[in-house]
Image: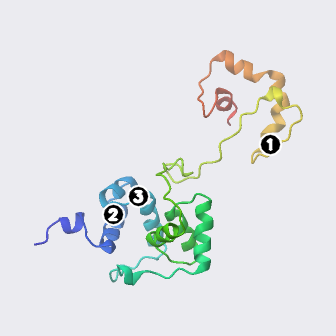
Amino acid sequence: MRDTSFFTHPENDWQRRYEALRASFVERLPARIVADRFGYSPGYIRLLRHQFQHGKIDFSEPVPEGKAARRRVTAEIRRRIKTWRERRLSASEITVLLSEDGIEISVRTVERVLAEEGFPKLPRRTRLKGGLTVNGAEVPERSQLVSLSKLNGKRFDCAGAGVFLFAPFLAQLDVEKIVTAASLPGSKVIPAINYFLNP
């Protein structure tokens, strides 16, 4: 006899994906909670949302399961999967990249290819380690600490290089000494001088 567990603990993968998306879109639950409820990773929930929003998931009939549904992976797709894993991308991230190129392939298939190619599973990463904030914004590369008093004509590559136009003026004012004397707050990631100079 069926009861509410049919919906809260679905047995079939296609229904589990459906219920996960329903919880995400209708109940508006965070990806972490939906992932815990249905046994997925938060990254896979974001992938499902992406595929659904772009019309790449069809629930008109169950998705075939089992070995019969295995998709044949071409040598070119296999090469791309290997290349992306060498850049430390997860299976779900690789699936999104393939999807953007019009290649529809499941996370499980990508994981299978990686296993066949001898790649170990990546350790679980936080969103921050994966380069994303809680709201999905990309995290920029960590800045390099440069002391104004030690620039001495050195050259640096920087996306916001315009700030260096003021470096001689800031060095002349001895801003670092002023910030230190004022005991302004700072952290290991963002020292007090960076907080102070951030526009």
Which residue is located at x 60 percent, y 30 percent? 188
Residue 41 has which mark? 3
Q: Which residue was labeled with disc 1? A: 162
Q: Earlier in the sequence, mark 3 or mark 2?
A: 2
Which residue is located at x 61 percent, y 61 percent? 86
Front position among marks 1 and 3: 3
- Indicate the amino acid at tag 2: Val
Q: Disc 1, disc 3: CB below 8 Å?
A: no
- Indicate the amino acid at tag 3: Ser
Real-space Cα separation, disc 1 to disc 2, in angstroms: 46 Å
Which residue is located at x 84 percent, y 32 percent? 151
Q: Is residue 43 left or right of residue 152?
A: left
| Image coordinates for residue 197, horizontal then vertical, percent | 70, 32
In the figure, residue 168 lies in which quadrant? top right
| Image coordinates for residue 62, horizontal then vertical, percent | 32, 80
Real-space Cα separation, disc 1 to disc 3, in angstroms: 41 Å
Question: Where, quadrant-wise, is the C terminus in this rendering?
Answer: top right
Q: What secondary structure is marked by label 1? A: helix
Q: Is residue 132 left or right of residue 124?
A: right
Question: Where, quadrant-wise, is the N terminus in this rendering?
Answer: bottom left
| Image coordinates for residue 98, horizontal then vertical, percent | 56, 72
Q: Is residue 180 above or below residue 162?
A: above
Instruction: Please identify the residue farthest to the top as the structure is shown.
Output: 181
- Indicate the amino acid at tag 1: Gly
Residue 26 has which mark? 2
Q: Is residue 171 above or below residue 38?
A: above
Q: Is residue 184 above or below residue 129?
A: above
Q: Earlier in the sequence, mark 1 or mark 3?
A: 3
Q: What secondary structure is marked by label 3? A: loop
Instruction: Please identify the residue farthest to the right as the structure is shown.
Output: 153
